[in-house]
Amino acid sequence: MSGPLPSLPGVCYPAGLGLQVVDLRVAFAERGRVARTVLDIPALGVPGATQLALCGPSGSGKTTLLNVLAGLQRPQRGSVRWSVVDLTTLGEGALDRWRRETVGLVFQEGHLFPGLSPLENVLLPLRFTQWSIEARWKRRALDLLERVGVPADGNLQTLSRGEMQRVAVARALLRVPAIVLADEPTASLDLDTGRLIADLLCTLCREAGATLVVATHDLALAGRLDESYEIVHCQLRPRLAHPAAVEAMVA
């Protein structure tokens, strides 16, 4: 599981897209009560190809923010701009196309299909747009599975939770996305397996030049990323407990 990320003939790796969030507000309506504000973020700027951690306790809004950044949930107010594209101005069809072409998603539980092999799971996103999968994509999927150390034709039901998450990482990187969004990718994994998944995710995204945003409770994972924020009382704040910040303060 080393060496450069396998490339595709005629496919150039995209530069990770920069993120600009302005005056963002997300609220959830509750029966018989005034809508509860979940996120209130005046501004957030993230340069392209940055690796960013979103921390905070369960229920703080980490997953909600990821959904907003992916265009899966619309805010009540504000703009979410990836490079020149403001997600809040796009219709549902345009959002679907943008997400399919631009974003790789890694979920906490992998969201794999047990009736399919690891290779078929990695190739699954292409099935929504192609009747038949081109040979170059199959080669890339095989290369990625070799990179993450999972047999392409294995039985998914015999894989460990960590191996399933490796398949999910390979699937997210298949189309060389400019953005990778990961929701608790190391949750429910033992320490060593969590470190392996974190290493794979960070390394593959770095090599592909993708902007990576991770919602996580894993402080070790958060500490190895370029920037780390926490959601406190609906607002996003830099994490003072980030290891790099602590080292700088001690020095």
Image (cartoon, rainbow, N blue to C red):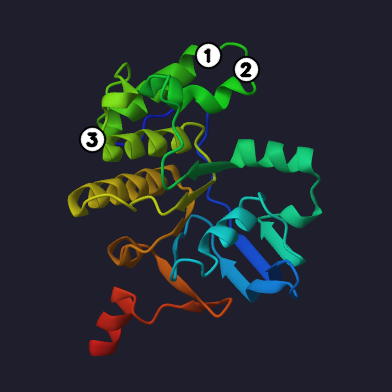
The quarter of the rendered structure image containing the N terminus is top left
The quarter of the rendered structure image containing the C terminus is bottom left
- Mark 1 or mark 3, which is nearer the start of the sequence? 3
- Residue placed under numbered mark 2 in the picture: 130
- Residue placed under numbered mark 1 in the picture: 134
Q: Quadrant of residue 47?
A: bottom right
- Crowd band around label 2 with a 10 angstrom C-alpha radius: few (<14), some (14–19), many (20+): few
Q: Secondary structure at mark 3?
A: loop
- Mark 2 or mark 3, which is nearer the start of the sequence? 3
Q: Measured from the top left, where is residue 79 in percent x and y? A: 73, 64
- Residue placed under numbered mark 3 in the picture: 1
In the rendered structure, are the residues bearing label 3 and label 2 in contact, judged by CB atoms less than 8 Å apart? no
Q: Secondary structure at mark 2?
A: loop
Q: Quadrant of residue 30?
A: bottom right
In the rendered structure, are the residues bearing label 1 and label 2 in contact, judged by CB atoms less than 8 Å apart? yes
- Given residues 40 and 114, the one toward you in this image is 114
In the rendered structure, are the residues bearing label 3 and label 1 in contact, judged by CB atoms less than 8 Å apart? no
Residue at left offset 27%, top offset 22%: 151
